[in-house]
Image (spheres, rainbow, N blue to C red):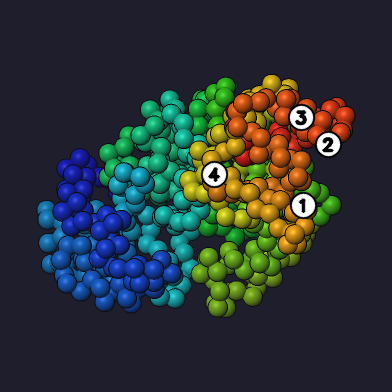
Amino acid sequence: MELTGSVVEGLRAAFAAAGYTVEGVAERLGVQANGALARNETTLAVRRTGGGDALDTMIRLFLLQQVVPKELVDKAFPGIDLVALGIVSGDRAVLDIRPFAEDEQQWWVIADLTPGLDGRREPMRDDYVLGIAPASLSLVHLTVPIKAERALDIGTGCGIQTLHLANRVNQLVATDVNPRALELAKATAALNRIDLDVRTGSLFEPVAGERFDLIISNPPYVISPPDSQLTYRETSFAGDRLVQQLVQQAPQHLTDGGWCQLLANWTCVRGEDWRDRLATWTGDRSAWAVQREQLDPSEYVELWLRDAGLHGTPAYPSRYDEWMRWLEDQQVEAIGMGWITVHNVAGALDAEEWPYEIERPIGPHVLRRFERQEGLPADLTGLHLVVADDVIQETTGQPGAEDPATIVLRRQRGMRRAEQVDTVMAGFVGACDGELNVGQILAALADLLDRQLVDVLTEYLPQIRRLLVEGFLDY
């Protein structure tokens, strides 16, 4: 699909005139119908869009996949032949064009039609191009907010990540093994007046010998038998080998101090700790892996068979059994799902499980956490610390007790962590107002507790470092 300058301006003008924006659609549908549509239910939205104006036409055509008379389409898009562009066939849309907003930016994203509306599930075409989805938004929220000369989006799909980066990256390169995805990504970029360099190929093949300040990827990470492939989510790589190679090869294509961030699935192999496996991927680079969820093999297979529209079909039982047998042969006892960030400086992997609620966007917190972890001095005693303004203290215990049974420090932002501390650590944090340095506060506590200062330093400095890295304390 080739969008020329005049077509781009015509489409943009039509969308603007109709109010086809995130806010415009939400206002037209109302809270209830909008919520139902988010669950792939269209009945209420159909009821709210019967007026026949341009906004109703666009919502029904693209978001609700309804039959729309040609005269209404022509009226909504004056002078633009959507059939010739391959956007409409007959009286139905064959592509999804929907608004997407972030902060003050307003865009439109071109992708394949959303599957599963009103419970209708049909097997997807092999080269299906996924549109705006929870995973793609998770990567948008994860990306560190840096300005960069060059950025690379591996497995770009419909190109949504490049929209997020356009205002802070001078040169954008997007790759994919699916030529149709690149066609739609290029169209999305053109519609939003973004200059995008698209290249066909796997992993880093299309950018051999090149380096980037930022590499992002929402790759086809689904761990499945090699012969069951939907291009947008699966590859012929065995197990989690695609993610492994992406992480291992990234430093060769990063500038010094550059960043690689990706969503990932990884296998939890019998007899191995998943953290140790990922550490062999990141090597001597500073990295952070967060496992947001872990599924047993049966849960994982069911999730992705439903995603492919196979649940309830005659092929479902045999595909289920085949997939389970394959995972058993690979000694897989669970599958981890989360994200990996690699900072191209010397360091090590910090890997953890965190299935709890986090702030979105999380990218600014990711950046600050790396800065603190990599920038803290070896000796903390000379630092003057203050408590972060989002930290609250919670205490529990029996009424009238001399000391609380538990003390928890809780952050309201970032990862929204909670750290249980003892009364000494709580006292230390309470004294962090920037006046005394760490060594002076710990010396005063040692004197108060009648303990050797060396023992207090040995016990509490590691805890202070953790509170600094996780943002409970600032300096």
Q: How many marks?
A: 4
Dot 2: within a 10 Å radius of its alpha carbon, few (fewer than 14), some, or many (20 or more) residues?
A: few
Numbered mark located on residue 225 in the image? none
From the viewer's perspective, is residue 462 above or below residue 10?
Answer: above
Nearest to N terminus: mark 1 or mark 3: 1
Q: Quick one: label 1 or label 2, which is nearer the N terminus?
A: 1
Identify the residue under disc 2: 449
Residue position marked by numbered label 4 in the rendering: 390
Disc 3: CA contacts within 10 A as few (<14), some (14-19) or many (>=20): few
- State the residue lying farthest toward the front: 400
Mark 2–mark 3 distance (CA, rounded to whole Å): 9 Å
Q: Quadrant of residue 315?
A: bottom right
Which residue type carries mark 4? Asp
Question: Can residue 238 be seen?
Answer: no
Q: CA distance from mark 4 to mark 3?
A: 26 Å
Cα–Cα span, label 1 and label 2: 15 Å
Q: Tag 3's secondary structure?
A: helix
Q: Quadrant of the C terminus?
A: top right
Res. 69 visible in picture: yes
Image point (39%, 71%), residue name: 36
Name the amino acid type tagged 1: Asp
Name the residue beneath numbered marker 1.
Answer: 403
